[in-house]
Image (spheres, rainbow, N blue to C red):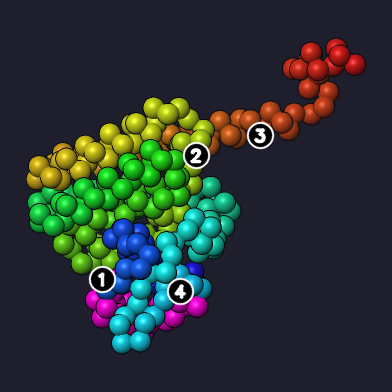
Amino acid sequence: MRLADQVIEKLLALVQARGLQPGQRLPAERQLAEELGVSRTSVREAIQKLTSQGMLSARRGDGTYLQQRPTADWLQQAMQPLAGLIDADPHYRYDVLEARHALETSAAWLAAQRATEQDKAHIQHCFDVMVQHQQSGHAELAARADAQFHLAIAEASHNLVLVQVMHSLFTVVLSTVESNRHDMFHLSAPVTVQALTEQHQALMQAILDGDPQRARDCIGEHLEHVRTTIQRLDEDRARRERSTRLPPDLAPSLLPDLHHHH
């Protein structure tokens, strides 16, 4: 994935996280460059590209305005290269979860100690947005808000390196969060959605309460839950595929009723 696309991806994520509406102004280029951890040149490039696609509009001497909300199909397009990677290598998602476990246990631990009132409000906001999208059935937006929620916690760790690593992982995390969520929500019971929300809430509460140990335990349990759920679904899928590949002479004995109707 080219750097330019990554910057666009981050910029859209920021627009989403801030809940910017069409007609509202984006932060100044310098501020965006700082927040996204990239050069002003690449911010300018990303803005130009999004302007030519009609997502943003530039007003001379007055900054850049959001023209339309980032839509699901636009995001789909941006995530294509990574989605391919996930499809090509089913183990990739597990590697991402493992890496997230390593990073996010530390991030949550630090966030519980260092989160400012502003950080806490931001984490709470991301959580609310996520629940809102879940309730209205916007799968893509819920996944994006989910990733934002985890990023907000990383940012509350006030460890710049951790934040940068999480940001660069973000593009990858987002696509795996999308596919994990897709699997978890479409292939398993509604109770899963409930469980996920409760886990996110417990994690948030631990950080709001300033309890590092509990925050660390919560993120561990949460990612472990995601892992076991998608693993179970992967195994079910493999089992279904095997059953469709049975040699024809075995099939009749397994599916007798299909043959008696002829």
Please state which of the two labelled residues, at mark 4 or mark 2, is closer to the viewer: 4
Report crowding for label 2: few under 14, some 14 to 19, many 20 or more residues within 10 A (C-alpha): some
Above/below status of 153 relative to 208:
below
Please state which of the two labelled residues, at mark 4 or mark 3, is closer to the viewer: 4
**Quick one: label 1 or label 3, which is nearer the N terminus?**
1
Residue 46 in view (yes/no)? no
* Range covered by the magenta-colored residues: 28-52
Report crowding for label 3: few under 14, some 14 to 19, many 20 or more residues within 10 A (C-alpha): few
In reply to whether residue 51 is colored magenta, the answer given is yes
Please state which of the two labelled residues, at mark 1 or mark 3, is closer to the viewer: 1
Labels in figure, total: 4
**Quick one: label 4 or label 1, which is nearer the N terminus?**
1
**Spatial distance from mark 1 to mark 3, Cα to Cα?**
45 Å
**Quick one: label 2 or label 1, which is nearer the N terminus?**
1
* Residue, disc 2: 183
**Quick one: label 2 or label 3, which is nearer the N terminus?**
2
**Quick one: label 4 or label 2, which is nearer the N terminus?**
4
**Spatial distance from mark 4 to mark 3, Cα to Cα?**
41 Å
Residue lying farthest front?
23
**Spatial distance from mark 4 to mark 2, Cα to Cα?**
31 Å
In reply to whether residue 18 is colored magenta, the answer given is no
Marks 1/3 in contact by CB < 8 Å: the verdict is: no
Residue at 58% over, 34% down: 237
Type of residue at label 2? Asp
Type of residue at label 3? Glu
* Residue, disc 4: 50
